[in-house]
Amino acid sequence: MLAVIRVILMTLALVFISLCSILLCLIRPFHRDNVHHTAKYLGKVSKILGLEVEVRIPESTKNIGPVVYICNHQNSYDIFTVPAAVQPGTVSVGKKSLKWIPFFGQMYWLTGNILIDRKNKNKAMNTIDMTANKIREKKLSVWLFPEGTRSYGRGLLPFKTGAFRTAAKAEVPIIPVCASNTHKTIDLNRWDNGKMIIEFLPPVILSTEDKDKIRSITNKTRSDMLVKITQLSEETGHELPQVNDKNSQNKQTSESK
């Protein structure tokens, strides 16, 4: 019964927040802080899940201007947990098809997020240039999930290099964002689902001279994030699922994006 009530409340909350955000966006469409304000309220929905979300931001990552944030992507609950960490002046990059989801899709578009057509490879290739240009011209930060999909208990998946190429092209730092494990830790029929920690790591500085080293920098950043995610998961009592990370690393070397 509790699970049914929670699903209904989360759905109503998502619709309500989306509608309020749409109204805000009609007043100031595509404003640089629309995503931040909407995300702030989406992040509060985690309380309905019985989950406490703690966000840790070290001084080294505060007020450093436009950056590219990269975060691990775990499951469908991310929509109600990860937004708690979204900073002012930040937008995300999502599938163009999201725009057609009732209420949420219109909110996602009007808040100023960047929509891309993943089915069109030529357009997808231009996404890096387009995103880098927006970072430079509008002084925006961009939030990306370098795994490219939800992991659903498969650990930290191999990283694509798009986020790093975007940062290098825009000449801005990468800020790794590590979220503790939530795979099979949330039971909708359980009142208290414990704690989730989201922690920002120090910036990874890139330059145009690093273009030939993007893959190695990507791999190194992923390794650093995996260590921190493992630590945070142990701290919350929700250890990260054991996967063959060596196989994941082997897959990374064959990827170009």
Image (cartoon, grey):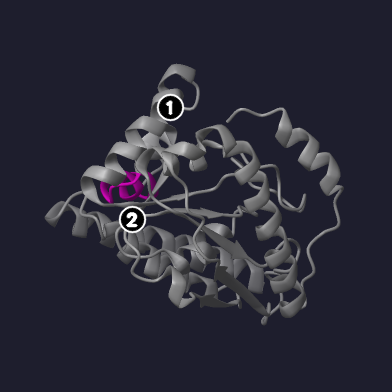
| In front of the other: 243 or 103 | 243
The structure residue drawn at horizontal position 12% and vertical position 56%, both measured from the top left corner, is: 27
On the question of residue 181 being in view, the answer is no
Q: Residue 55, position in %: x, y?
A: 52, 75
Residue holding disc 1 = 117
* Neighbour tally class for label 1: few under 14, some 14-19, many 20 plus, Cα within 10 Å: some
Chain part drawn in magenta: 103-113
Q: Residue furthest left?
A: 27
Image point (35%, 38%), residue name:
131
Q: Secondary structure at mark 1?
A: loop
- Does residue 22 appear left or right of residue 161 in this picture? left
Between residue 136 and residue 40, name the one nearer to us.
136
Residue located at (39% from left, 63% from top)? 39
Q: Which residue is mark 2?
A: 66
- What kind of element bears circle 2? loop
User: Looking at the figure, which quarter contains the N terminus?
Assistant: bottom right
Decide whether the magenta segment is chiefly helix, strand or loop: helix
Residue 240 on image: x %, y %: 78, 63
Residue 191, by quadrant, is bottom right
Tag 1: residue type? Asp
